[in-house]
Image (cartoon, rainbow, N blue to C red):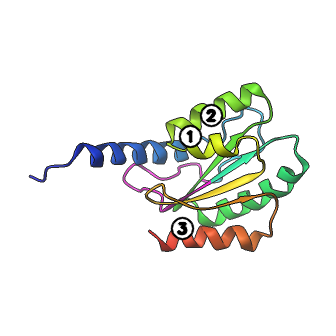
Amino acid sequence: MKLVSLKEKIAAFGFAILAIACSTFASASEDSDAKTKSPSGPSVEQKPKSVVVLIHSRVCPVCAKVRPIIQELAAVYEPGVCFVYLDVTDDKAKAKSKQLAKSLRLAAFFNMYADTFPCVGFFDKNEHPIHELCGAYPKRKYEEYIKKGLEKS
């Protein structure tokens, strides 16, 4: 029988929560039009190979340009890539997003960029940051970092 360290158990539990969250949470906002495309999402056994986090506001015109791009990429890359949408439109949405980010072990990213939106964070399977893109970019730029996350898995 293999002994598993506490650190390994905590990491596995955190990633299991992330996998469950990717399958159940479309957005931290009830009113958000950003929805996860995959209804089933990854199971606990099928961990995402990469995570993409979008911090956005429903009233931000730049966010309105970025959200559809991320949603298109979600349609292509899910369930191997988990897409998380964190809404910061108002205090209620921001509080829900902060709680969701904390539960997904993305609190540091959320705290750093909650007031800088849109901001897209790319993480590898071990939840290590790959890159952040704040502002609007062409679809190919977001896809480039998604592919980097998948290469690291």
Label count reads: 3
Of the numbered discs 1 and 2, the one sitting upstream in the chain is 2
Taking the view exactly as shown, the residue that stands out farthest to the left is: 1
Task: Give the CA separation, mark 1 to mark 3.
Answer: 19 Å
Q: Position of residue 129 (x, y in %)?
A: 54, 58
Q: Position of residue 12 (x, y in %)?
A: 34, 48
Of the numbered discs 2 and 3, the one sitting upstream in the chain is 2
Mark 2 = which residue? 98
Query: Image height check: is 101 above or below 48?
Result: above
Q: Nearer the viewer, residue 47 or 93?
A: 93
Under mark 2, the amino acid is: Lys
Q: Which residues are magenta?
A: 38-52
Q: Residue at x 54, y 67 (%)?
A: 149
Mark 3 crowd level (few <14, some 14–19, many ≥20, 10 Å Cα) = many
Q: Residue at x 63, y 69 (%)?
A: 145
Give me the disc on residue 149. Answer: 3
Mark 2 crowd level (few <14, some 14–19, many ≥20, 10 Å Cα) = many
Residue contact between numbered discs 1 and 2, judged by CB atoms under 8 Å: yes
Examine the residues drawn in magenta and state their main secondary structure: loop
